[in-house]
Amino acid sequence: MAKTERNDRDIEKLLTPTVPRKKPRPARLWPKITNRAYVEAAKLLHHDEGTLEVDDNAAVSRSSDGGAYIQAWVWVGNEDVGNQGSAADDNRAEERAEEKAS
């Protein structure tokens, strides 16, 4: 290989910008986000009085995917449950268990 070819290749390497091989983590792309900011965003996006409520002191679980899970309260009325899990079901189960034990 001729000396000029090698020099041309070396110069080309020096002039070619290097690209980092690792992508930055998504969390680094955003400024520091406080737990309070996540809670406030959850309230604005999802809060519905009496249906889905987010407390001021809700627990925040950050994710490496660039977001967070926010603790919330969801209302479930008795009529939504129906007969599932009623006290009568519990009593009948206890009665059956006692009958088997006898």
Image: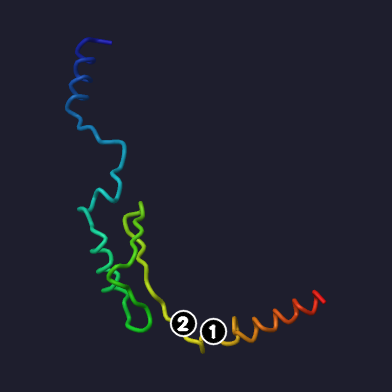
Residue at 19% in and 13% down = 4
* Quadrant of the rendering where the C terminus is positioned: bottom right
* Residue 36 to residue 77: above or below: above
Q: Position of residue 18 (x, y in %)?
A: 23, 32
Q: Quadrant of residue 71?
A: bottom left
- Point out the residue furthest to the front here: 102
Q: Amino acid at mark 1?
A: Val
- Give the number of marks: 2
* Quadrant of the rendering where the N terminus is positioned: top left
| Mark closer to the chain start, 1 or 2 | 2
Residue at 34% in and 77% down = 53
Q: Which mark is residue 67?
A: none
Q: Amino acid at mark 2?
A: Val
Residue, disc 2: 76
Q: Nearer the viewer, residue 86 or 24?
A: 86
Marks 1/2: CA distance? 7 Å
Q: Quadrant of residue 11?
A: top left
* Residue 20 to residue 93: above or below: above
Question: Which element is circle 1 on?
Answer: helix
- Point out the residue furthest to the right here: 102
Residue at 29% in and 68% down = 57
Q: Nearer the viewer, residue 34 or 22?
A: 34
